[in-house]
Image: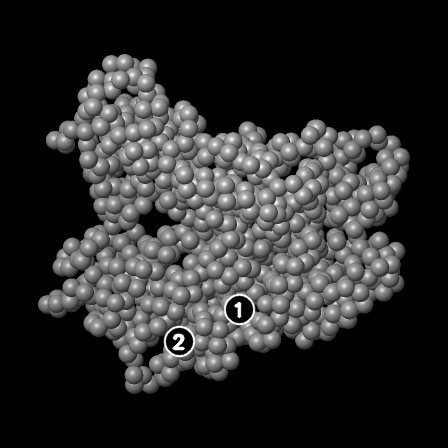
Amino acid sequence: MSGASRVATAPRLYDRTSELAAVAELSARAAEGRGAVLLVTGRPGTGRTALLDQAVRDSRIRAHQVAAPSGNRVPWSGVRALMSALAPTPSAARRALRAARGTGGVPGALAALCPGEPLLLCLDDHHLWDAHSRTALDAAWRGNTGPWAWVVSFAAYRRPPDVPGARLLSLGRLSHEGARTLLDDVCRLPLTASFRTRLLDEAAGHPGVLTATAARVRTDPGRGDGPPGPVTDDASLAQVYRGLLDSLPAECGRVLTLVAVAGEPQPGTGRPDPVAGGPAAVRPVGADAVLAVARAVRASSEALDRLVADGFLRGTREALRFDDPFLRRAVLGTVPPPRRRELYALFARTAGGRPGARSCGRSGPVGGDDATAGNRAAAARTPHLATPVARASVPPGAGMPAPPRALGVPARSGPPRNVYDTGHRSDRLRKGMGGATGDVRAPEGARVPPDVLRGRAELARGLAGLGGGPVGDAHQVLLLAASLLRKAAPEEASDARSLALEAAWAAGDPQACAVALGGGDFGGERTGSPDGVDTVERDFRDGMCAALTVRLEEARAPLARVVARDGASDEPRRLLRAGAAALVLGDAPAAVRVHTRALATLRATSGTALLPRVLEHLAYAELRAGQHERAAAHAREGLRAAESAGQRNAAAHQHAVLALAASVRGDAPAVVEHAHRALAIARAHGLVQAMTLAEWSIARAELAGGLAAQAAARLAPLVQRGPRGGHFALRMLVVPCFVEAACASGRELEAGAAAEEFAVWAGLGFDAQAPAQLARCRALLAGGSDCADWYREAVRRHEESGNDFERARTLLAYGKWLRRRRRLVEARGPLSDALVTFERAAAEVWADQARAELRATGGAAGRRAVPGAAGELTPQQQRIAGLVAAGATNQEIADRLSLSPRTVDHHLRNVFARLGVRSRVELSGLLLLSPAPGDGHRFDR
């Protein structure tokens, strides 16, 4: 969300000795034939571009600096600029670009242009490069084996490129001595000692602020004597931060303006008026007051979430603040005084005259009536949120969507109920009906301990964050609530711990899951319960703890007992817990059965608070069982329920499930739509699970469309361990897709390593699909006649596991392998079987692939009528013509269809002659109304 900053450049660098030494070390490694990557980041005006300029000037090996192309929306414009900088002629640059877009990628193009020559390549403003170039460069850096040193700069508030082992340098402020030297160099006008001191103090070592302020002093000699008011005026700061502010989406810019204005005292409050030029302290800014005014200026809460997630804003909901104080003043410098006063008036009308008013309760200890009112206010703002229950964790790769919340607490109207009537409360919660989260008042005459009051207030805050805010923050708040409620309200403490587990699971943090699962009060002190609740909860806790620590054999028995006992219950809490345990055990049919029972129970009892979550888990279980159309139908219903209840985080998960279901059908537009909607919320709120599912669905659509290299680059981070990888419980599920994409794009070493780890997981027996998928991975990686044996083994394993779609994908891969080895008669059987299965599953793109492969063997394939000119072509010619119409080059078509470029050219000449066209443009226009069958018309560069 950051743009490039363009301010006056100092004649040389200051206080950057260590950074230049790091670049020199990188160049030395390249000279020795060892490539490496150095990432450089910094806030606007800290000198990223100047550092790269100096690095190129000081380099002892061939060095080039490449800035972000102005047309950063044009695909491959960044790689084109890089090749143009290195190539001796334009034609050589075009050849290198074609090579970079092929199977060899950027490393292959560099090796062809500069064979064996060490290079220092400085890429400026990586965040502004086009997506195609970023993907290609990221892939090159992950496997950087050439003698190339890369120095890559990107703006602060941007996620760094995912490059394992890369060193990250953050450009900070200058020392006092460095700032004095810089000021002497850029400002030749004599300054008084007092003015000089004030300027250095206010700039606080920021090189961009010093340079911009000094430039204004040079144009205004009167300032050298020391003007009244701040030395670093807002206009100078706006100049420094102009690129950043211009790059923000309009909604985000409006929200930043509101937060900046809300932090200033209003005119007429007895404090100095900042519009009139007086100094003013920054006021605390409440998020609720900002959001109330945001609606009036056409800005949404998503914009505020994004600014917080990207680090522009920090603090609590009650007291937001700018991460960079200079940025706040720069934002104010862009707001004319009349507009600022209009916003003051708007705050006064909307928030009772207090822009910084806090309406979320107190952040410190609370008690008495204030705490009760604060808790009720928090509950009133989140009527859709559910009260907790046990959420399940699964081992890496088990693939459970999220541990289920089993108790729902919708808001209700009317007088508060006696919360000490635990029998009535527990009965309603077990039935999934719940009560109001704001019911925190005790009966007349009862005295509520202060810790309980504060704990319930924190529980309400945690519920609000879990339903529609950053889940990492919600996890900490809920753990605090559990600790406060532990002694006086153990049942509520158990609920808080269960919700903390849910938040940690959504965030993809196994350590935080273990913390939420641990503790003697998990499940509350419910000894002596006639229905054996504590035994089942103990089994659930023990099984999940064992699964999290990959002691899967120890997890099997207690989780099987949970499925057997809770799966026969009529209480939503127990049914969801049983479904979670079934997914951990890899028993997808049992998970579908249990979650279907939970859904029926909720509908019979009119329970609504848990409906989005139950539908989400049911849809995911159906996906795991291969019931894709049913999964999509339940996910759509769950999305409507989540949106009507205002559960934005639940809606993100539903969008991710819908994207995954659409990737099975091959509906690329639906995949993109749902995945992007899921990512928009997930990135802002830290929903790693939803992000992993969404990215996986996009990669599957890319793989189905023939973009194997792009799919492999997208999936590679998801199969890695650690905080930069995907969700820990989904890693192993993604591996088979990654192996297929990696083998098709020349990344066999990475595919082999992932397959070996997957083999260990498959051997544990917790995923019924894993043995068949492992055999398919072995076939893709094997050479010679072993491939056929592995494919046959995979088909046999699929017969045992029962997932028809995965079996059809294996048959399609087997049929392709046979056809490419001219075993045409043998290939027709697997391809025909795959085609029928894909058609039955409405997987259109996959069916098109099977149909095209079957026609290429000479077999009969049912197909849609081919209108117009395309019907005059042979099946192979139709595929090539469709790819040409989609913009593919001959080399790309050859890579896609496993042909040579000369063969493609031969077929294309015959297409031109048969259709009477003379150019690729004419062919594209002719086929526009006559799309060829097969997958060619879906090719997307």
Could you tell me the amino acid type at mark 2?
A: Arg
Please state, as top left, top right, bottom left or bottom right, where the N terminus lies in the image. Answer: top left
Looking at the rendered structure, the kind of residue marked 1 is Ala
Query: Which quadrant would the C terminus be assigned to in this image?
Result: top right
Residue for point 39% across, 47% down? 309
| Image position of 877 with respect to 214: above or below | below
Residue 213, how many percent across, how many down?
31, 24
Which residue is drawn at the image coordinates 18% and 58% (left, top)? 365
Task: Return the residue at label 1.
Answer: 398
Q: Position of residue 572 (x, y in %)?
A: 42, 71
Q: Is residue 14 left or right of residue 201?
A: right
Q: Nearer the viewer, residue 141 or 69?
A: 141
Q: Position of residue 555 (x, y in %)?
A: 47, 78
Q: Which residue is mark 2?
A: 541
Numbered disc 2: secondary structure: helix
Whether residue 703 can be seen here:
yes
Is the residue marked by circle 2 packed among few (<14), some (14-19), or many (20+) residues within 10 Å?
A: many
